[in-house]
Image (spheres, helix red, strand yellow):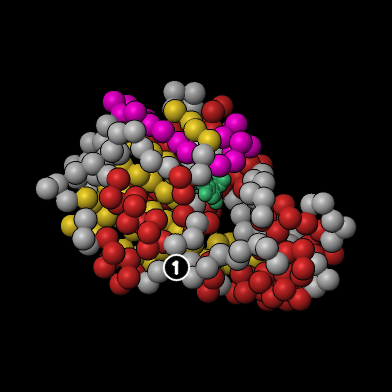
Amino acid sequence: MTDPRWDPGQYSRFEVERDRAVLDLMLRLPPDLSPREIWDLGCGTGQHAAILRRRHPEASVHGLDSSIDMLEQARAADPLIDWRQGDIADWTPETPPDLILANASLQWLPDHQTLLSRLAGSLAPGGVLAVQMPMAFETRHHSILRAVAAEGPWASTTAPVRPLQPLLTMQQTYDLLSSVCDEIDLWSTTYLHVLTGEDAVLEWMKGTALRPYLTILEATAWTEAFLSTLASRLSDAFEQRADGTTLLPFPRLFLIARRRRS
Ligand SMILES: C[S@@+](CC[C@H](N)C(=O)[O-])C[C@H]1O[C@@H](n2cnc3c(N)ncnc32)[C@H](O)[C@@H]1O
């Protein structure tokens, strides 16, 4: 299927909630890390690579993303970063990185056994891999999305979309990284996002999980019916509260792993 088309405006609507996780991840970076070569894989609109460049002004900072639309905003955010369009699946750095950040991007790629080993294996000695991924598969809103996509008259159109898959367990992740890394920190957190506005969970999903579905439905007449069915199922499951808010519990997995120095 064609690559999902990202919408930087829709994605940024929930910037405060989405940024919380990457800031929590960055807080756990080893304090003695003084990187010269930094990559942000799946950098999106580029604000996290820009934070890293400000934090490490001596470093070469690169941001990779497959979406031209996201990269256009990134370039505007910080022209001093080396922004590149490309697929994380094909990425090989010219120089071994001292820091790879991948926030909310790797969940879109298959075969995490191979992917995480490859990323950790590409690090310079003492380099750090820092990853945050939503544990989306287990959530109620993703289970509703999978059901709605599979049930309606649009089902044959949306069938090629590969829904987000369960992540590796923390133990599996530890085992596969421990052959090349010696400081491994894995944890999960469930954030309770307090969303505002009508159809808040649908609007949240329009920025990320729905991108492949909206892209594939674009050329059909089903988009409106698909979205209104999904909106109604989501609002039954996530009631708007008396104060107008909607609560969205969202579990996320965090990983920091440091490549052995020898
Ligand atoms: C949910 S956004 C996260 C963006 C950014 N890291 C952030 O935290 O704001 C996911 C990003 O990953 C990018 N992406 C998804 N799959 C990718 C791939 N295979 N190669 C490169 N970028 C990818 C998308 O284009 C999108 O910009």
Please identify the quarter of the rendering in which residue 223 is found: bottom right
Seen from the viewer's position, the closer of residues 68 and 25 is: 68
Please identify the quarter of the rendering in which residue 140 is found: bottom right
Residue for badge 1: 167
Find the residue positioned furthest to the right: 221
Report whether 211 appears left or right of 229.
left
Q: Is residue 55 magenta?
A: yes
Q: Is residue 33 magenta?
A: no
**Vertical relation: 47 (above or below) 168:** above
**Vertical relation: 152 (above or below) 33:** below
Is residue 199 among what the camera can see? yes
Find the residue positioned furthest to the top: 80
In percent of width and height, residue 156 lies at 77, 68
The span picked out in magenta is 53-73
Residue at 64% across, 46% down: 6
Residue at 38% across, 66% down: 188
Give the total of numbered labels. 1
Residue at 61% across, 69% down: 142
Image quadrant containing the N terminus: bottom right
Q: Secondary structure at mark 1?
A: loop
Seen from the viewer's position, the closer of residues 107 and 224 is: 107
Q: Amino acid at mark 1?
A: Leu
